[in-house]
Amino acid sequence: MKRTSVVQALHAETLIISSVLQIGDSERISARTRALAVQRQYELFFGPEGEQIFPIFTKPIPRWTSPPPVAARQTLHESPVISVQSVRVLAISSSAIVHIGSTSTAEAEARIKHIRQLAGPAPSAPTRGRDS
Amino acid sequence: MNYTVINRHLHVGDIRLVAVASASLFLIGDADEIHLSSAFDTPPESLIIGPFVPLVPARGEAP
């Protein structure tokens, strides 16, 4: 048995990139994000690039296997309610989950790679050696 | 092993969050299993100074 969640007021501003805002019970929630964030000094687009070539997007992440449930476990809900007056969230992003209610399994995975590309020194500018 | 959990009265006032991000979970309720993983990569090679060319993996980073 799971408890009932009561929230009087919820205010969420922004929900983006594979995030979940769940009101009510759920059985299984699964969210996945792969983000390649490239910042270039100039607006230059080479079409699709780098989507599958970085290991961060493909390397397996070890998964923790849950131990067998404790045989003599007893849970007593003296109060069957979890109550919250108000919730305010500004942003929910990149496979984040905001969940009001109970669930069985919640899983989320985010893989993010940041790259910054800046222009080098102008070719005409003389390059100084370290010793001079 | 005998293991007893007693959930007593739980009442929370106002919760203010700026952000929930990158495979995070904000849960008001019960759950059986939670699996969250996040990988964030910003190695030194991710700062590229030089000609603008399409992205290729750094040496030693080949898949």
Image: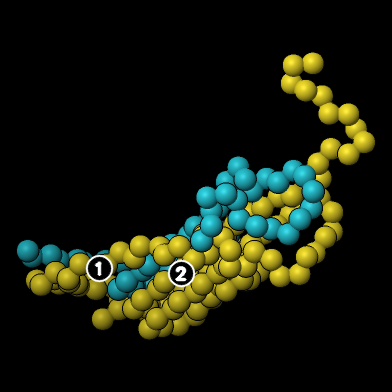
Q: Position of residue A76 (x, y in %)?
A: 19, 72
> Chain for mark 2?
A
**Location of residue B38 with respect to A128 vertically, above or below:** below
Circle 2 residue: A108
Residue A66 disc label = 1
Name the colouring of the figure.
Answer: by chain
Q: Quadrant of residue A25?
A: bottom left
- Residue A131 relative to residue A122: left or right: left
Q: Secondary structure at mark 1?
A: loop
Residue at 57%, 74% in the rendered image = A18
Q: Position of residue B34 (x, y in %)?
A: 36, 68
Question: Residue A99 or A127: which is nearer the viewer?
Answer: A127
Amino acid at pointer 1: Ser
Q: Secondary structure at mark 2?
A: strand
- Residue A99 relative to residue A46: left or right: left
What hue does chain B carry in this figure? cyan
For this orientation, the residue located farthest to the right is A124
- Residue A18 relative to residue A107: left or right: right
Quadrant (top left/top right/bottom left/bottom right) for the N terminus of chain A = bottom left
Residue A87 disc label = none
Q: Position of residue A7 (x, y in %)?
A: 48, 73
| Crowding at mark 1 (Cα within 10 Å: few <14, some 14-19, many 20+) | few
**Location of residue A120 with respect to A5 vertically, above or below:** above
> Chain for mark 1?
A
Amino acid at pointer 2: Ala
Badge 1 and badge 2 in a common chain: yes
**Location of residue A71 with respect to B39 vertically, above or below:** below
